[in-house]
Amino acid sequence: MNFIPPFDETRLRAAASGTLASGKPVVVNADETVSVVSGESGNQSLGTETQLKATASKNFSTTYDSNSDRFVVCFDAGNEGFAVVINLGTDNSVTAGTPVKFGDSNGETNIAAIFDSNSNRVVIGYKDSGNSNNATGIVGSVDPSDNSIAFGTKVQWSTGNPTYLSGVFDSTNNKVVFNYNDNSNSEYGTTVTGTVDPSDNSISFGSVVVWNSARSRYIASSYDPDRNKIIVCYTHSNSVNQLRVRRVNGTSTTAVTGPITASADNDWRYPTMAYDTKNDKTLLAWKGAGGTGGSKTRVISLDSDGAATLGSEVTFDSSTSIAYLDSVYNATAQFVVLVHKGKGTNNNHGVFKPISISGTTPTVGSEVSFASGETNFITVASRDAQVCVGFEDDDDSDYSKAIGITLAYSTTTLTSENYIGMSSGGQVASGSNATVDIIGTVNAEQSSLTAGQQYFVQTDGTIDLTADNPSVFAGTAISATELVVKA
């Protein structure tokens, strides 16, 4: 049996995005190209906690250097700033380099580490407590051959006293941006923009700009690369939690929109934000103050002009006693990883949980403990399907530690709506015109089918007798090699 209806009624020709093997389920993409259904999955596994420095540590910040494929964990140990380069194995093994002190005085605190992907350098902003609490930045280059990091000369950008320091890298303008509370200026919300010169590991800063002329605490910031905007969240005058959108303009930043109310919780704690590149949304999470109904998360959407809208608040933990929130988006797993100090059954252990976004709604996955003791100052960075978590182990003399985690995930290009048929006519290279047998057509490029059986598209791009999630009907077999598409 080999019935082929008229070509222009039952077959579609469209440009292929990626190679199309023949006889495979095909989806249509938003750009009007077609692709075979694809998916991947991974199982969760945790590495072993590894000590970084046998000194009481705090004020952690972790970043991922994609150029050297190394994580850099920064912290204050004994009132001195240190950076440790980590080679994270695919088995979650942590190979840590020697801790390297950054700065040239005692008292590097309130640390924020960023990776500048333009210069391939790690930038650390901090309060130089050993030098009148001045706001200071320093640039480091990672050598993966021995897991070391070398720093340039520290640069003071202000005599201000920065607290709640939060940094982002603007990949459009190739600038690092630090937002902070300026304790020397009535705790006003303040920002500064830096430009890195990789030739000598130096950094130059533009003018300091006040973006909120009132007390601004518990600051978090993130960068939206699709709209070239920076989102800043903070508590205004210890009562209202607000959001502002800014953008880099030369060597400074200017206001775009805001302030708007970011949550109804009074005086939140430990806010964190992560940009979801798949959904083009930013996830905000925070620890609620007492009596506010728990700790929460919500989705922030920006339009092309930078105007922000917020989805509904979703409680991810009923406790308001959790602490040390941090988050990062994992592009392979396609969800945000939220880490924090747990409470209740976790006995103050560090925990992580996946949070996925659908529309403007966050869905929080199951909580998993990653540390055996009480943990503080937790921080996280991401690569592939893994994250590296740095933390202080309160049950082991407050020593600094790190652990690697492989995430459990399952991703697919298939939705409940985008399946259009089966590819035919042989393999087609990406960018070439592909032929797709659509509804009612007999696709004769199958194998091992059972006539009379209904087949369903699987998330990995195969077809089977059992429906997957989402449930998508592929068609009915009329022979071992023929499938009536989606009839």
Image (cartoon, grey):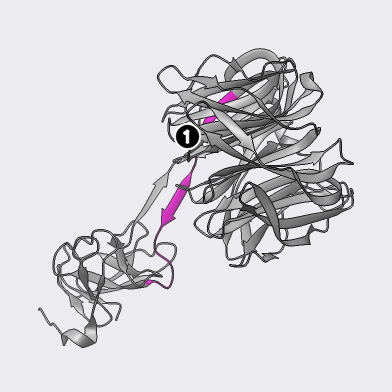
Q: Is residue 370 left or right of residue 433?
A: right
Image vertical order of residue 356 relative to residue 13, above or below: above
Magenta residues span: 402-418
**Residue 173 at what x, y percent from top left?**
54, 49
| Residue 407 sits inside the magenta stretch | yes
User: Is residue 461 visible to us here?
Assistant: yes
**Amino acid type, label 1:** Asn
Residue drawn at point x = 48 percent, y = 40 percent:
117
User: In the rendered picture of this protein, how many numbered marks are placed on residues?
Assistant: 1
Q: From the image, which quarter does the C terminus lie in?
A: bottom left
Q: Position of residue 167 (x, y in %)?
A: 65, 40
- Comparing 458 with 449, the one in front is 458
Residue that mark 1 sits on = 120
Residue 463 image-quadrant placement? bottom left
Q: Residue at x 25, y 83 (%)?
A: 440
Q: Give yes or no for residue 318 being in the magenta stretch.
A: no
Residue visible at 47% across and 19% down?
A: 147
* The N terminus, quarter of image: bottom left
In the displayed structure, would residue 99 be above or below residue 377?
Answer: above
Q: Residue furthest top?
A: 54
Q: Quadrant of residue 247?
A: bottom right
Q: Nearer the viewer, residue 375 or 116?
A: 116
